[in-house]
Amino acid sequence: MTALQEVATRKPPASASVRREALYFALRNPKLLIGAAIVLLFLLAGLVGPLLVSATPNEYVGKPMDPPSSEYWFGTTTFGQDVFAQFVHGLRTTFLVGVLGGGIAAIVGMMVGFVAGYRGGLVDEVLNMITNIILVLPALAVLLIINAYLGIRSVGAQALFIGLTSWPWAARAIRAQTFSLRGRDFVDLARLSGANTWKIITREIGPNMSSYLLLTFILLFGNSILIASSLDFIGLGPTEGVSLGLMLQNASQWSAMQLGLWWWFIPPGAAITAIVGALYVANVGLDEVFNPKLRQT
């Protein structure tokens, strides 16, 4: 390997001082710490909580409409189901849909954005046209039609549908960032050394956008949770299992608010609001950590 090839294929690594600096500001950023703590708290509840309850989410375990007590921490439904058991299982499902849906959207958006931004020309025009078509489609309406008429009502299918309709804005943002990086010296050197498009994107351009890609995934993660909860609430969620959105749908269907069963609908609603809000707050905090102009000293 020649000296030129060694320079071209070498990624401009972040120095230890830069990493220490980012860690310093991350540990002192209240938005990031509070947002991350809230998300981790609910994630831990979703992972550990189901192991602490013996009842399944839809099992009839007690008297109907029992208020919260030492036996049933979140009370029971109108059918005598344990609301806490539904809540912790619903957290796990909600996080799963968010990770899968956000992950699929992030992967598709990155692939389209990187290729369009780096290749340019006809490839960019075609991919940009496809992106614009998907972008103007009413995503929620498309998801409603797919769920209603195809009858595919599983967590995996729901996450797939959300991911395949949520990527366009991420692709456009990544395309713009890639377009600005493809003319940098280290990319030109990699191109002159004979590196192919895939290696240049994955070894040169991608690592220099790692912080931006992380922020993009967090936003897609929160967006997937919101869309999934909306579908669940209107009755188009998974036909088996339970999620926070399905809990709200069942509480609404069986008049929990009118009957004063606040312990049935407040926990899932508060959890969805807290998780999505915390993700956006943490995202703002990360932006301040990665962007020196926004840091609070």
Image (tube, rainbow, N blue to C red):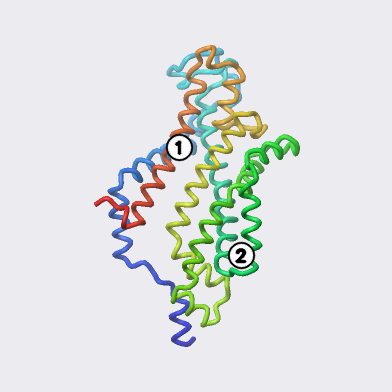
Q: Residues within 10 Å of mark 1 (few under 14, many from 20)?
A: many
**Residue 283 position (above or below residue 18):** above
Name which residue lies at 62% across and 55% down: 131
Which label's residue is closer to the chain start, 2 or 1?
2
Name which residue lies at 30% across and 49% down: 27
Residue 265 spot, x, y in % from top left: 51, 23
Q: Amino acid at mark 2?
A: Asp
Pointer 2 and pointer 1: residues touching (CB < 8 Å)?
A: no
Q: Residue furthest right?
A: 149
Q: Which mark is residue 124?
A: 2
Side of 263 where 138 appears, left or right: right
Q: What is the quadrant of residue 61 in the picture?
A: top right
Residue 187 spot, x, y in % from top left: 48, 74
Name which residue lies at 44% across and 86% down: 3
**Residue 136 position (above or below residue 49):** below
Q: Which mark is residue 91?
A: none
Residue placed under numbered mark 1 in the picture: 275
Q: Secondary structure at mark 1?
A: helix
Residue 234 spot, x, y in % from top left: 63, 29
Q: Residue furthest bottom?
A: 2
Q: Amino acid at mark 1?
A: Ile
Q: Secondary structure at mark 2?
A: helix
**Residue 239 position (above or below residue 297):** above
For the residues labelled 2 and 1, the Cα–Cα distance comes to 36 Å
Which sits in the foreground, 104 or 183?
Answer: 183
Residue 134 spot, x, y in % from top left: 64, 50
Which sits in the foreground, 146 or 16?
Answer: 146
Foreground disc of the pair 2, 1: 2
| Total numbered labels placed on residues in the image | 2
Side of 267 where 26 appears, left or right: left
